[in-house]
Image (cartoon, rainbow, N blue to C red):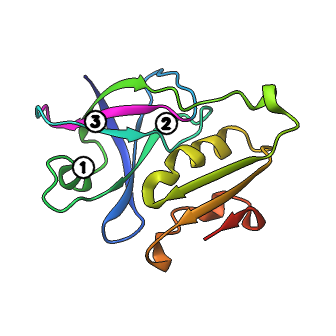
Amino acid sequence: MKNHKVIATRHLTESTFVVRFERNNIKFQAGQFVLLNYNGLVDHREYSVYSGENDDYLEVLVREVEGGKVSGKLKQLKEGNKIGVAGLFGFFRFDPQKFSSQKFMFIATGTGISSFHSFVRTFPGLDYQLIHGIRFGNETYDHLDFEKKKVTV
């Protein structure tokens, strides 16, 4: 794991937040994930990248898990703190140019929206429909980044 400096933590709900940290020249494809840990602890967690491929930073969307060994610590991060980052991993990615005439159906619940958020930020002209299952009205994590007519909650 390499340390990255936290740029900001943005709280979306009482238990859900976005951690933005330095990219440090990491190249990734939308849909991949990283491993994060806090303060060199042995415990780490997998988080899908939430930011777009062309952003100058990396972001992950985190839901605090009661009794969790990592999410509660990540929630306490402040600007300038360091977090351990390893990766990128995963094969949940695609090249929409290969499917230029296709329409994509994205289906997610809760924080599972992360990869689709990254897809839409990376490929703004993408033809898609998003179905996002949520329990409460305040869990529409950054829906403003999606085209309103293309989102069903």
User: Could you say which quadrant of the image residue 42 lies in?
Assistant: top left
The percent position of residue 138, horizontal first and vertical second, equals 47, 76
Q: CA distance from mark 3 to mark 2?
A: 15 Å
The residue that mark 2 highlights is 57
Q: CA distance from mark 1 to mark 2?
A: 17 Å
Magenta residues (range): 31-40
Q: Are marks 1 and 3 in contact (CB under 8 Å)?
A: yes
Q: Earlier in the sequence, mark 3 or mark 2?
A: 3
**Three-letter amino acid code at the position of disc 1:** Leu
Q: Nearer the viewer, residue 137 or 25?
A: 137
- The image's mark for residue 101 is none
The residue that mark 1 highlights is 74
User: Could you say which quadrant of the image residue 43 lies in?
Assistant: top left
Which quadrant is the C terminus positioned in?
bottom right
Q: Secondary structure at mark 1?
A: helix
Which residue is rendered at x = 50% and y = 44% of the image? 50
Q: Nearer the viewer, residue 82 or 126?
A: 126
The percent position of residue 92, horizontal first and vertical second, equals 54, 32
Which residue is rendered at x = 60% and y = 32% of the image? 53
Tell whether position 78 is magenta: no
Q: Crowdedness of circle 3 by 10 Å Cα count: few (<14), some, many (20+)?
A: many
Viewer-nearest of discs 1 and 2: 1
Number of residue marks: 3
Tell whether position 34 is magenta: yes
Say if 124 sits above or below 9 in the image. Answer: above
Q: CA distance from mark 1 to mark 3?
A: 9 Å
Which secondary structure class fits the magenta region best?
strand
Q: Crowdedness of circle 1 by 10 Å Cα count: few (<14), some, many (20+)?
A: many
The residue that mark 3 highlights is 36
